[in-house]
Image (spheres, helix red, strand yellow):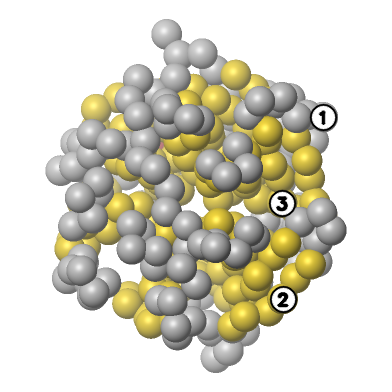
Amino acid sequence: MDAHIIIDRGVVDQLGEGPTWSPSTQRVYWVDIVGQALNALDLATLDVKRWPMPERIGWVVERRDCGNLLAGFKSGIVALSLDPVTIRPLLSPEPDRPGNRLNDAKVDSAGRLWFGSKHDEDLEQSGALYRLDSDRRPTQVDDGYAVTNGPAFSPDGRYLYHADSGRREVYRFAVDAAGALGPRELLITFAESWGYPDGMTTDADGGLWIAHWGGGRISRFDPEGQLVRSHMLPAVNITSCTFAGDRLDRLFVTSAALESPGGRADGALFEIDPGVRGLPPTPCAV
């Protein structure tokens, strides 16, 4: 039986998203997109800090050799330091798509940043997937998404997983050493009763963990897209997940109060016992 632990801090996330593990600070970071805030859970004390942000923030990742974070704001990618909060704009990857915002990101084992975008009001299928190398030049690698979510990588780095939540589809791309993608391959189609595929991560055994927006669960799939098991949670809109801890054997799961009926634990952060270990995070080289 899973130990479903609600991290109760007296604050619920309107749209909790983008959890990431920071070994250097021993924190789990995650964002509240609509609430315009960054959260951090100290694993030693279970204390939570929350920093207001000046605009919608979709994700943060650790930077290599910088001691700070890279963050995806609606206006673009910024260098972010905490205590005190300082923000330095770095680039705006979509100046031609002013209705978009950044949505979800991960760093691969080479230190490259992969991130998606979406229309902020869900009015257009204007989302795209990008790769950002250490030269800070974004490369668009796929386009035409309703809602980008993911990405995640196989343990050997040969495959990238990504989702279009609006279409209920999860894709797999072959990826070479230089970061070039092969053709988009449909891996999983979510049944209507499952809700929509949202954020995801992979474990050390190659399992793909996907959050179910509107489905109240998180599920593990094998590398070929077959459902292995699901873990039900007391919230409707489950948004993303990350492995954390020194042994990478703790799985933290975000959720959203937005578009939820209320009365349960919508908008909380959860911890479950995954029974497997995750992959060590790689700091971003940007």
Label 1, residues with CA under 10 Å away: few <14, some 14-19, many ≥20: few
Q: Earlier in the sequence, mark 2 or mark 1?
A: 1
- 3 vs 1, front mark: 3
Residue plotted at (37% across, 81% down): 140
Extreme residue toward the front, this view: 65
Q: Which residue is mark 3?
A: 38
Q: Position of residue 52 (x, y in %)?
A: 82, 55
**Amino acid on which the number 1 mark rests in the picture:** Gly
Image mark for residue 88: 2
Label 2, residues with CA under 10 Å away: few <14, some 14-19, many ≥20: few
Question: Does dot 2 land on a helix, a strand or a loop?
Answer: strand
Are the residues flagged by discs 2 and 1 in contact, CB closer than 8 Å? no
Q: Earlier in the sequence, mark 3 or mark 2?
A: 3
Label 3, residues with CA under 10 Å away: few <14, some 14-19, many ≥20: many
Who is closer to the viewer here, 259 or 224?
224
Residue plotted at (25% across, 46% down): 155
**Residue 69 falls in image quadrant:** bottom right
Are the residues flagged by discs 3 and 2 in contact, CB closer than 8 Å? no
Q: Which residue is mark 1?
A: 10
Who is closer to the viewer here, 125 or 173?
173
Real-space Cα distance between discs 3 and 1? 15 Å
- In the displayed structure image, the side of residue 156 where residue 6 appears, left or right: right
Real-space Cα distance between discs 3 and 2? 16 Å
Q: Position of residue 284 (x, y in %)?
A: 47, 63
Who is closer to the viewer here, 237 or 76?
76
**Amino acid on which the number 3 mark rests in the picture:** Leu
Q: Position of residue 39 (x, y in %)?
A: 71, 45
Residue 34 visible somewhere in the drawing: yes
Residue plotted at (63% across, 42% down): 25
